[in-house]
Every structure is written in C-alpha cells, then in structure tokens.
Image (cartoon, rainbow, N blue to C red):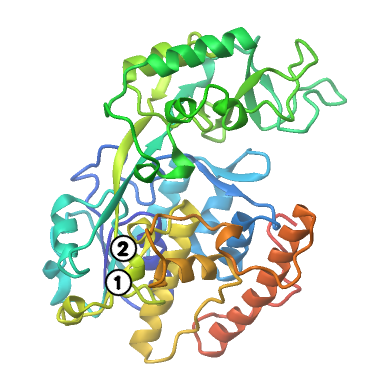
Amino acid sequence: MSIIGGGLAGSEAALQLAAQGIPVTLYEMRPVHQTDVHKTGYLAELVCSNSLKSTKPETAAGMQKRELELLGSKLFAEALKAQVPAGGALAVDRDAFARAVTSLVENDPLIDLRHEEVCSIEEVSETSLAIVLATGPLTSDALAESLMRYVGGTSLAFYDAAAPIVMADSLDRDILFRQSRYEDAVGSDGSAQGDYLNAPFTKDEYERFIDELLAAERVIKRDFESKDLFQACQPIEEIARAGRDAPRFGPLKPVGLTDPRTGKRPWAALQLRAEDAIGACYNLVGFQTNLKFSEQKRVFSLIPGLENAEFARFGVMHRNTFIDAPRVLDSCLRVRTPEADELGVPLFVAGQLGGTEGYCEAIRSGLHVALSVTALIRDIPLPVPPPTTAFGSLLAYATDPGTEEYQPMHVNFGVLPPLDKPPRNKRDRYAAYAARGEEALLGYCAELASCGLLGHAPDAAHAHLGA
C-alpha cells in the first residue's frame, strides 16, 4: 500500500490505515526536495495560516471538526494538543503540530516513511495493493504529468497566497491592543483580554496605507480574474483593488473592537494571531499577499504598531494544481477513468489535489480514503457520508458530474442540501443545519462500526468539541 505525499491528507491516511493493520509505505520528497513555500522537512507542515477555523458547533467548520472528533482523526487529536489561543477558532503552533505528526508516523511499525521523490505513478504501481496520491496543490511537475495520463489529460489550477509572520518583540505594544471581537479589552482585574493583537487605523492612516498598497510592486505582474484566485485566500492588494473600502469590510473590519486609547471603534483594524504557544511570532490575519518582499516590508510597516516590525516570514503567492474531480473521482475518491483502470492497481486522490480546499478538509479526505482502501482490501461495501454532513456535502459537490466550472471548495452551508423548513433567523438556521448533520453523522458512524471500519459507534451522549 503506497501513499505519495506526507501532508495533512497523506499523514492522516497513513496513520488510519496502520491503525487498521494495513502496512503502508509513505513517500515524502521533503526535505530532499523542497517546495517554494515549505520551510521544514516535517510531515503535515502548514504553509499558509496556522488556523483550522471555527470550533463553534453551529458553523460548517465546527460541523467538520465534530466529524473528525467522532471518526477518531489522528491529526485532529494532535491539533488539539498543539492549540494556541485564537478566540473561537482552532489555531495551532505549526512547528509543534508538524513535529508531533512526524513522530507518530516515524514511530508506527506499520509505516515505512521514505524521504524520496516519486516522479511517476508507475514507479510504485507494481509493488502496491493501492496507491493514494496526496501530494497537494504543489505537486511536482513530473508527477503531475504522470497523473494527467490517468485523469483524461485534464488539469486545472488557481493561485493561492500566504500571509506574513512578524516577530512579537518588534511590535509596538503602546499602539497595539489585545482583544477578541465583541469582548471587553480589559478584564475586571485590569489585565489585557483576548486572543488577538489589534492594530487600529485612523481614517488618514488607512487611506495612506491603501494608496501605497495599490501602488506596490507585485511578484506576479498581472491583474487576476476572479477565477484565477482562490476566494478564501485572496491577496490583500487584490481585495483593495476591488474597492478602497473593501478591506474595511473584510480582513480589516473593526467591528466588535474598541481601541482602549480612544474608547471608540477604530476606522479599520488588522488582527494578529499568535503562531506558537509562547507568542514569539504573530500572523497577519487575512493578509495573504503577492507583493515583493521589499514592498511588504515598506507597505506593511505603515500599519500602526508595525512600524519596526521584523518579518519571520514574508507572504508568498504560488500556483496550485488540482484535478477536475467531478469528471474523474467517485465517492470513494478513487480515479475512475479507462486510463486508470488500465494501471492495474486502484488509484485514489486525497487532499487539496482533489479540490477539497482547507486544512480540516484535507485531513478528513485522508481519513475517507483510508476507509475506502480498507473497505476495498476487505471486500466490504463502504458507507457513503450523507450529504447533510459537512464532508458528505463537500464530497457530493466534488464528485458530482453535474458540477460545472469546478473550483476548490471549503465546507460551507452553501453546498449543504437546503432545509425543509429553514428558520428565518440566520443563527437558528445554522443551528438547524448542525442538528440535522449531527443526526446523520451518528447514523453514518453506526454504519461504519457495523462493518468493522470504526472501533465504536458514537451516540448522542458523546460530548461536543469544546463542551
């Protein structure tokens, strides 16, 4: 059994298959061959944000985490251990998380970890019961060319970006204030509250910043069409290009914040989230960028409190590759084309290469592929996640041949089937989605348990995440 790619999806799949008693060879080319955005040789390295999104049960992201919890995700358990403060979101110390996952894989007797590059699927096909391709959106050119032979020659791509990280001791704490949205900035004991640092803009400071942001030199020197950019990670300069006030209603929205120096809401505000447990570095939330490094230093130093900021990592933009999943993948995430059938060994795709965009989505797809492979080896039918669950809805979208102009997608309420009688209030409506999904999820887990693919069947008495 071969897995190519040791990111989130590949690592989860390897650990899940090993837990089922299935030996795995896991190939990861780093650190022998690095990508433009990875910094270490660890498995499951997070290259963009360190946030795994909301933990609130009445959100699509929270529903996804509930699935990972009940299905026994190995990586989700490590993410909880590596958690750093981030309000209602699950953010992790990315180095601690990647080290922990790497250690789990290295110490599992059923996983043979090989740090070497696989340049073609044929290299491992003759020695594998099945192949899982989990190389992510930064798949090497050689392997991508090999894959194209088995997916009908179709491939798609979009541009993704990562935000800068700054050193905590270079920030001006006389200007920045600690507060999470809609929470008091100062507690009853006079201490600072909240999980985020906030950089408040006056109107004049904001206008000057936007002027320089729009005039700054970019790495990729062209204007992007919306189809080229993954919408959840648009560069801050592209957001501003859509309208000068667009950042104030997006990453720089000041809603729910109070500047303790003025007692008022700022005109705009940048939030900074801790990168590690000790708060040595901070991520500029929502500040993915395509600016040259020198321009990032110049323009982002105009942000109040960041005048002397030292950058631990500049933001980067890169081309991501994904396959046209609705045309080539089935509900097991197996490639079903005449070319793949001729390969002689089942070929699966997990993670962002298949267009399931997002950290938890990648983990969940790796878990799903592990279930698929286990069911195939044991010759038992695999229950399909109901479309009313978070991942089930994403899977239905990603494998529906009727899906047109396929683009990478996070879990979201927009791809869930509509409610029969949706409440008019948005909060109640989201809670109804979550309640319906919980019922379907418990039934799905029971099905998995009945066919031996899950150790136990969770019931409604299982505590929710964060309860």
Q: Are marks 2 and 1 in contact (CB under 8 Å)?
A: yes
The image's mark for residue 220 is: none
C-alpha gap between disc 2 and disc 1: 7 Å
On the rendered image, what quadrant is the N terminus found in?
bottom left
Q: Residue furthest bottom?
A: 379
| Residue 234 visible in the displayed image | yes
Image position of 271 with respect to 466: above or below:
above
Which residue is at a point 50% across and 55% down the rendered structure image? 410
Which element type, helix, strand or loop, lies under badge 2? loop
On the rendered image, what quadrant is the C terminus found in?
bottom right
Q: Identify which residue, 435 or 381, lies in the foreground.
A: 435
Image position of 45 with respect to 203: above or below:
below
Image position of 108 with respect to 207: above or below:
below
Provide residue 139's location: percent of width, then percent of height.
24, 52
Mark 2: few, some, or many residues within 10 Å (few <14, many ≥20)? Answer: many
Specify the quadrant of the image occupied by residue 315: top left
In the rendered image, which residue does mark 1 sit on? 328
Which residue is at a point 71% across and 27% down the rendered structure image? 179
Provide residue 119's location: percent of width, then percent of height.
13, 58
Which element type, helix, strand or loop, lies under badge 1? helix
Amino acid tagged 2:
Asp
In the rendered image, which residue does mark 2 sit on? 324
Which residue is at a point 44% across and 17% down the rendered structure image? 213
Q: Identify which residue, 444 or 310, lies in the foreground.
A: 444
Which residue is at a point 56% across and 71% down the rendered structure image? 71
Is 91 positioned to the left or the right of 378 in the image? right
Amino acid tagged 1:
Val
Image position of 297 with respect to 271: above or below:
above
Specify the quadrant of the image occupied by residue 235: top left
